[in-house]
Image: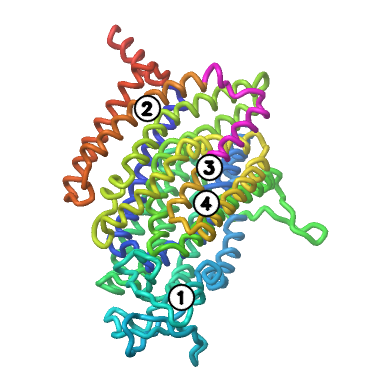
Amino acid sequence: MSSMQKKSMIATAAIFCCRFTGLLREVVFTSLFGATGALDAFLTAFRVPNMLRDMFAEGALSQSFTSVMSKVEKQDGAAAAWKLANRVCSQLISLMLIIVSAGILLAGTFMQALYPESARVVVEQGNVATTTFRELRTNADGLKEAVFLAPSIPGWLDSQSCIRLKTAEQLRPGEEKELNDATVHASASDTNGLSVAPRSYMALATDLCRMIWPFILLASVSALCMGALNVFGVFGLPNLASAAFNLTTVGAGVAIGWVIDPAFGPEALYGFAGAVVLGGLAQVLVQLPKLKQKGFRAQWDIGLSRRAGRLCFTDEHSRKVWMLMLPGVIAAGITQTNIFINTSFALYLQPGSVTALSGAFHLWQLPVALFGVAMGMVVLPSVSRMTLTTGDSGREIAEHLAKALRFVALFAVPSAIFLSLWGEEIVSVFFQRGRFDAAASALTGSVLSAYSLGLLSYAGMKVLQPVFLALEKPWAPAWLALFAASISVTLNYLFVMVFRMPVQYLALTTSVVTTLNFLFYFLYLRHLLGTMACRRVLLPGLIRILCAGLLLGAGCYAARYFLFGGFTSWTFLERLGSMAIGGIAGAGVYGIGCLLFRVPEINAITNRFLRRRKA
């Protein structure tokens, strides 16, 4: 196993802890609050600052900083690298204080733009046979009210009940409608049904968003710490810091939420919002001892001066970090805005759609983070150093990337097969408890299956994207992401607003766009480097991996239809045991397939083992 693969496996193990605790966090959320409008409000509120975290922290800033700091450390030594870290950190904190302040002030505007307007439902008892729509009116407080006549008033209806204003505007006076409680019925069973939500959650989402905003500052500083440690070959601890965030969010959130509301109603989510900020603080604190051990000493150094009436960088290297980051922010911003837009489209679908997207997305990202992100994290510093060497560096970098992509595919292919064919069963094991029922498992599982179609491409993207920074060609991902995002928004609008398709199609759009984005990255890097070592390194191994994946797919398909009937009605232990046995058996089938088709990575491990036995 190469040094790159060993470092990748260390990062993978740490990221597994991070993602596993992230899933634990999602399990706690769904168990306490279910796939409901209240949890949708929390996830929507978290989406705004989290989008900026992915743009500034875990995306462009971390990667551009790692690329520049790696070169500074190699050319000028560790002291110069830490001086650069202090300057960039000081500049980052100053910028984030401005962004956090603006975010808190504009939280209401963000939520108003996201949430569809609602109208209160008013039911008046009358001498009618069925519930009929009477009128849409504006009350004395300026609120819209949809008035219905009914033979009796439903017991679950109260003064907070509402429907979407757009739906109410489409009703005609005298039209017969059946009113369904959205907390019981996920969607209307026919065209005569209306889903009535217990309340409009826009105000709750606005309050939660304001509370969560400081998290982006702490998360950005944490990502800078991660980038610095990666430069010095530390890949495990920075990723374990995210596990500290998840555990703090769960522990503190449950404790504070219980104090606010022991029944864990919507108001308990305020406790989890505060816990998100505490988790961000924990994420920074766990990395500080290792940073000090490596030579870091905190010092405020803004690295800016006023010249000719404007601010200028005093250091060329810190300037390069931000110049490289700018196109990365645009690229990441386009991608994250696309996810953000997906959330807004999901708000127009049945209640719980945002929760289904979020839960499936976390499960989908688990293998991506384990292998794609981990490999990309290891590739960036090494490729950055390769660009400083003379000779045929393009061919050397291409072969390095081809081996990295092949290694990622070895794990991404079986992951995609498991998530695609066993999506509902996997969701059921992780999430089905408390208020998250079998129907929610079925919905989230179908979304996960749609996401899984783009898993291999997404993992490959995570390997290739940082390379553009190492080559100092940062604008290419920005333009490619803009093109891909325009396709995504168009498809989402057609699927949801025109054809009224369910939430699964939002995930399918993500898979399609992710695949296109990977192809754009791959072809452009091939143009820059002159080769991607496809025929000699990448394709022979990838074809063998796909053949082994076909054997696994056949086994998973047979198991689902012959052994997993009625899976979501089983007890938790039965579901967990069956998944464990099925997963082990599937891994065995895939391993045998890799040996039969002589996958290079597996061959290298077996040959080394045989040599040791002979010795």
Q: Which portion, as a residue range, is magenta? A: 515-537
Q: Amino acid at mark 1?
A: Ala
Mark 2 lies on a secondary structure that is: helix
The answer to which image quadrant residue 293 occupies is top left
Q: Which mark is residue 203?
A: 1
Q: Would you say the residues marked 3 and 2 are in contact, meaning their CB atoms lie under 8 Å apart?
A: no
Give the numbered dot on residue 382. Answer: none
The residue carrying mark 4 is: 54
What element does badge 3 sit on? Answer: helix
Q: CA distance from mark 3 to mark 2?
A: 22 Å
Instruction: Give x and y (percent) for residue 282.
Output: 40, 55
Main structural element of the magenta stretch: helix, strand or loop? helix
Give the answer, above or below, for where 13 lies relative to 102.
above
Residue at image point 39% right, 77% down: 176
Res 191 visible:
yes
Q: Please state the total of marks drawn on the protein image.
A: 4
In this view, the residue in front, 221 or 603, is: 603
